[in-house]
Image (cartoon, rainbow, N blue to C red):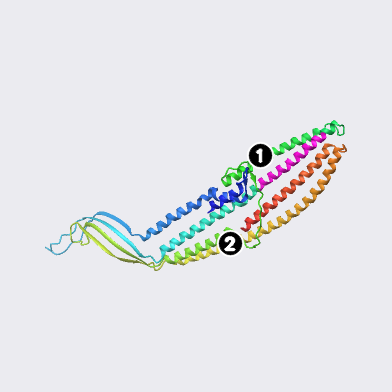
Amino acid sequence: MKRIILFFVLILSIGGHSQDQISLDACYELVSINYPLAKQGELLNQKNALELEVIDAEKLPQLNLTAQATYQSDVIAIPIPNSGVEPPNNDQYRATLNVNQLIYGGGAIDAKTNLKNAVLNTQQKQLEVNLYQLKKQINQIYFSIILTQERHSLLTSKQAQLQTKLKEVQSGIKNGMVLPSSDKIIEAELLKIKLQFTEIEHSKESLIGTLSSLIGKNLSVDSNFVNPEIILGLSDSITRPELELFQLKKTEIETSEQLISKQNSPKFFGFANGGYGNPGLDPLDNSFQAFYTVGVRLNWNIFDWNSTKKQRQSIIINRDIVDTEESTFRLNTNIELNQLQTEMTKILDFIRTDAEIITLRNEVLKSAESQLKNGVITSSAYITELTNLYEDENNLSVHKIQFMLVKANYKITKGQ
């Protein structure tokens, strides 16, 4: 089912575009399938199937073959003269095949089967929890890549603006309206931008390499990582897989308790023994002969020195431990959610302030452009104002991406 979902996610995020587009949801799906730990799911199923076969074998007849040869220093003798009964030989031989068949086991086998299945469910859910926790790591890397894309876009805009301004300055120098060497200052700034492009590209390449390793898919540095639309649910409830894990642990404990209650139940067996030896069942017949016995047997451990009682007490303690783990998890999750809510409020304040600053910076830059064109200020002064605007726009992009990251982490923390 996961592979079908992944197929449609990838079709929506990649299909119809000449350039590969990668979505955050596609990364979630890929890591849940391709991460090495995900392969444990099938291994756990295989292991459980084998263990269930071992348990089912307890319902089948149990065969036991024994053979022995002995020499006795003394044998039975009949103290009656001329009785005609020969004493058995000192050397004796016997081979027997014993068959035991469980008739009634008190429900212990079914209880063992239920416990194995409960353990499997717990292990599978624990695996799901471990994979789920990778999502925050995916978030951190994914939005860092988004940030490099935004920085690249802003830097491209700054570069284009400087290139346009360079042509204007060079024209002004020719016409004697702008100071000579003013173009050199802009050219130097363009070289700095080239270095910044190199830094961004290397950073993006490193991040994409890390993400590719996590999700098990080779991603190109030319891939376009889509800004996700993150919608937070209105429900206040936490729906994390860890909560399901706690419930499965409790179910496993209850199943263990049921098995303990069956351990001391009476068990009925049917048995048959057949063999060949000298002597046989008649110790006075001093010859090799075949023999057999059949019957039923009852096994009932009527007193176990309070072992069952102590095991039940241990199970009660285990249940209390799981309850404390669940309470601790809920408490820590609510604390984390409150912190993330505070962080979102703070970042929104930053974004509003950034927008106001950028509005003012644009007005200052327009004035600087006019002054540079008329030779009132130098190229350095203009570049300073342009750089100030670029840095403030970059701050706005950082805060917007931080806000998306916090929202994504909030959604994962809540289990939406």
Q: Is mark 2 on a helix, strand or loop?
A: helix
Q: Name the residue under label 2.
A: 326
Q: Given the current orientation, which residue lies at the most extreme front position?
A: 16
Q: Does the magenta stretch include residue 46?
A: no
As displayed, is residue 372 above or below residue 277? above
Secondary structure mostly seen in the magenta stretch: helix
Mark 1 crowd level (few <14, some 14–19, many ≥20, 10 Å Cα): some
User: Is residue 27 in view from this perspective?
Assistant: no
**For the magenta stretch, what is the residue range?**
143-169
Of the two numbered discs 2 and 1 in the rendering, the one whose residue sits closer to the viewer: 1
Indicate which disc residue 202 carries. 1
As displayed, is residue 216 above or below residue 164? below
Foreground residue, 398 or 27? 27
Image position of 103 (left or right of 200) = left
Percent position (x, y) of residue 6? Answer: 56, 51
Foreground residue, 106 or 186? 186
Give the amino acid type for the residue marked by disc 2 in the picture.
Glu
Who comes first in sequence, dot 2 or dot 1? 1
As displayed, is residue 63 above or below residue 218? below
Give the amino acid type for the residue marked by disc 1 in the picture.
His
Foreground residue, 98 or 205? 205
Percent position (x, y) of residue 151? Answer: 71, 43
Percent position (x, y) of residue 80? Answer: 14, 64
Q: Is residue 149 magenta?
A: yes
User: Is residue 158 in view from this perspective?
Assistant: yes
Q: Given the current orientation, which residue lies at the most extreme bottom position?
A: 302
Mark 2 vs mark 1, CA separation in Å: 43 Å
- At 45% across and 53% down in the image, what residue appears? 47
